[in-house]
Image: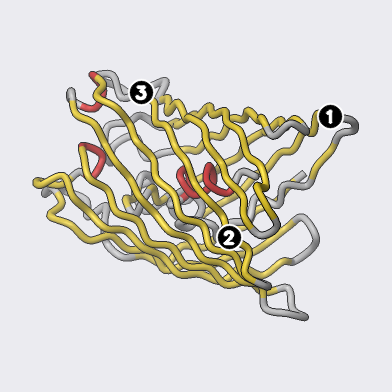
Amino acid sequence: MFSSVRSLLNASAVAGAVFALPALAQDGTGELTLSANAAVVSEYRFRGVDLSGGDIAIQGGIDAAHSSGFYVGTWGSSLDEDTLGYGNIELDIYAGWSAEMMPGLSVDVGAIYYIFPNAPEGDFDYVEAYASAGFRLGPGELTVGLAYAPEQDSLAGSDNLYVFADAGVGVPGTPVSLAAHVGYTDGFLTFTDNNQAWDWSVGIDYALTQNVSLGVAYVGAEGDYLPGDYEFTDDAIVFSLSAGF
């Protein structure tokens, strides 16, 4: 249900795209279901860009889903306040609708509000709409989608388009799953001179228990990135330990 949200937040976030399984273990009855997730990652990557200064990040979220397909949720992560000036906390609030249109085909649409409550200077908060389609192919799944942030003051009066594709497959008879991600950004959020950038990741996840998983991913980005004291788009190996409740 939340695959596109997790991709948008984590394609970062937890190792790059779909690697840090939030393990949406559900706790509820009737029409409303509640779930929570938590993770420790060796580095927070958002669409290939390092937002934790190469340091460990603590992340987690809470979701509420209705049987009609509508859902709301929140997710947060620690940041490195000196890397890009966002402060040391990111808080995301999202809402949307997800449904299986037919066997093997699901859709997900919604919006995310990215909040940086203690950014030292300026307004960094912005809103982004998203849509995706997921295709179940035997033991594997393919998700394609896009996200669009319209012109906003926090984006220097610009807009931003992100398109992505995620692929994942579980190895039959094992607790191992494999995943790959590729994304393309056109707009202010690339942090590049020409406002264009690619990001990608490949990874493996091992389910330690039904609700706890250990992951590792190779994450990279390519573009004419702005110079600075810290190379926040260098390729990296990102480790994650995540749990769902």
Report which residue position mark 2 lands on: 135
Which residue lies at the image location 59% right of the left edge and 64% below the top edge? 141
Specify few, some or many for label 1: CA neighbours under 10 Å numbering under 14, 14-19, or 20 or more. few
Q: CA distance from mark 3 to mark 1?
A: 32 Å
On the image, the x and y values in percent for residue 135 come to 58, 60
On the image, the x and y values in percent for residue 15 come to 48, 57
Report which residue position mark 3 lands on: 125
3 or 1: tag closer to the N-terminus: 1
Specify few, some or many for label 2: CA neighbours under 10 Å numbering under 14, 14-19, or 20 or more. some
Q: Is residue 91 left or right of residue 36?
A: left
Numbered badge on residue 31 = 1
Which residue lies at the image location 48% right of the left edge and 60% below the top edge? 166
Residue at the right extreme? 29
Numbered badge on residue 226 = none
- Residue type highlighted by circle 3: Asp
Which residue lies at the image location 74% right of the left edge and 31% below the top edge? 68
Specify few, some or many for label 3: CA neighbours under 10 Å numbering under 14, 14-19, or 20 or more. some
- Residue type highlighted by circle 1: Glu
On the image, the x and y values in percent for residue 173 come to 77, 80
Q: Quadrant of the C terminus?
A: top right
Viewer-nearest of labels 2 and 3?
2
2 or 1: tag closer to the N-terminus: 1
Q: CA distance from mark 2 to mark 1?
A: 25 Å
| Residue 203 seen in this snapshot | yes
